[in-house]
Image: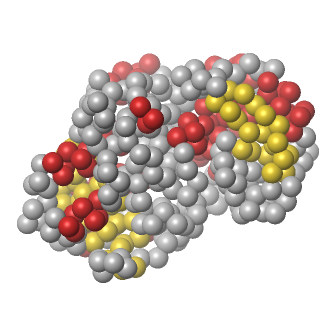
Amino acid sequence: MPVKTGLDIFCESGFQQVWGKKFALLCHPASVDSNLTHILDILVDSGNIPDSIFAPEHGFYGSAQDQIGVDSSRHPRYGIQVISLYGETFDSLYPNQEYLKNIDVVLIELQDVGASYYTFVWAAVMVMEIAAKTGTKVIVLDRPNPIGGKIVQGTLQEDDYLSFVGLYPLPIRHGMTIGEILYYVNEEFGVGADLEIVRMKNWSRDMWFDETGLFWVQPSPNMPTLDTATVYPGMCLLEGTNISEGRGTTRPFEIFGAPFIQPYNLCESLSTLQLTGVHFRPIYFSPTFNKYKGTLCGGIQLHITDKEIFNPVRTGIAVVKTCFDLYPGEFKFIPPPYEYENEKLPFDILCGSSCWREMISDHIPLVELLDAFDSPSDEFCSLREKYLIYG
């Protein structure tokens, strides 16, 4: 049976939670029902018009590239105020507390992709934090984790490395829905918000997005397909290096490289690692924007041969270490700023620790590196179980 998202269930119930309420809506382009109708159009057509729209990173239209501040505006069709929650400062990530005091409900409808550094879930958490202070109810319309809800990979962020790409401790590949993450943060860290999760129907933890019967709508400019989401938990680590992660190509995160990379040599080195579920193919490409714009780069395209056994975190670490070892004079961990962090290295805050970088720099064997950072502690896995609301 096709999955019904929280939005579908919300519509079937007749929008009861917002009837007669003054409410704000946090959403983005992928906030659609199973018929591809956007939540804002659904609400307006039903006579439930939000007082304002909160827009996370990339803006309401999903048109802004990563780390580009977005101005507030008015919706061109409905004239509703669109309040940006991604400006030039860290404080801009929070909604205005005085404004939220006059709002009864914040309705959240966001598509996550299953990796802790994808910022939409943290935008929702920051709204929830302010809502807890103002007594504003938070309703999250839950959506599938597109890469499944069973597998957990990567270690937790250390306290000193929490940031907007990991605001609370969470493994890189967390295997949770956005509703479950908000539930976990709200309860485990004493946020104290009045939180309601509108649950999905027919979704199970072993489902990939292409098994849900739902249409893929890209939630951000560089997340065009499920294939992108599948590799993203590992390949996003390249954002903290001078290796292009494929932004400016039609296959971001599946393609990576740099002008100094010899693709056939790199492909041979990666292929000898016998990483499961992935095939490496040597390529040349020229990004149209971002790193090495207009410059020919040697690199690799990842082809996922079996997503059930593919481990994106292990693959991402292996790619970074192999590039570091093969190109010691050219490979670099880039300096800040990155996602409002001005002191710590971007690679470190993506990993949630400096240990990964230090072990790579110290030429620790890959097998030791993977063993150290492949999965979270048993303690966290047990804790996580408390907040899973689907079987």
At x 44% / y 19%, what residue is drawn? 378
Q: Where is residue 176 in the image (x, y as percent from the top left)?
A: 39, 34
At x 53% / y 70%, what residue is drawn? 69
| In this picture, residue 308 sits left or right of residue 24 | right
Q: Where's the C terminus, which quadrant?
A: top left
From what the image shows, is residue 371 above or below residue 5? above
Q: Quadrant of residue 84?
A: bottom left
Q: Position of residue 51 (x, y in %)?
A: 22, 73
At x 34% / y 66%, what residue is drawn? 54
| In this picture, residue 117 sits left or right of residue 184 | right
From what the image shows, is residue 241 above or below residue 44? above
From what the image shows, is residue 337 above or below residue 186? below
From what the image shows, is residue 35 above or below residue 309? below
Can you see residue 93? no
Look at the image and name its color scheme.
Answer: secondary structure
Q: Where's the N terminus, which quadrant?
A: top left
Can you see residue 39? yes
Q: Position of residue 304 (x, y in %)?
A: 64, 30
Q: Quadrant of residue 383?
A: top left
Q: Across the whole image, how many numbered discs are drawn on residues?
A: 0
- In this view, the residue in front, 343 or 283, is 283
At x 47% / y 25%, what residue is drawn? 151
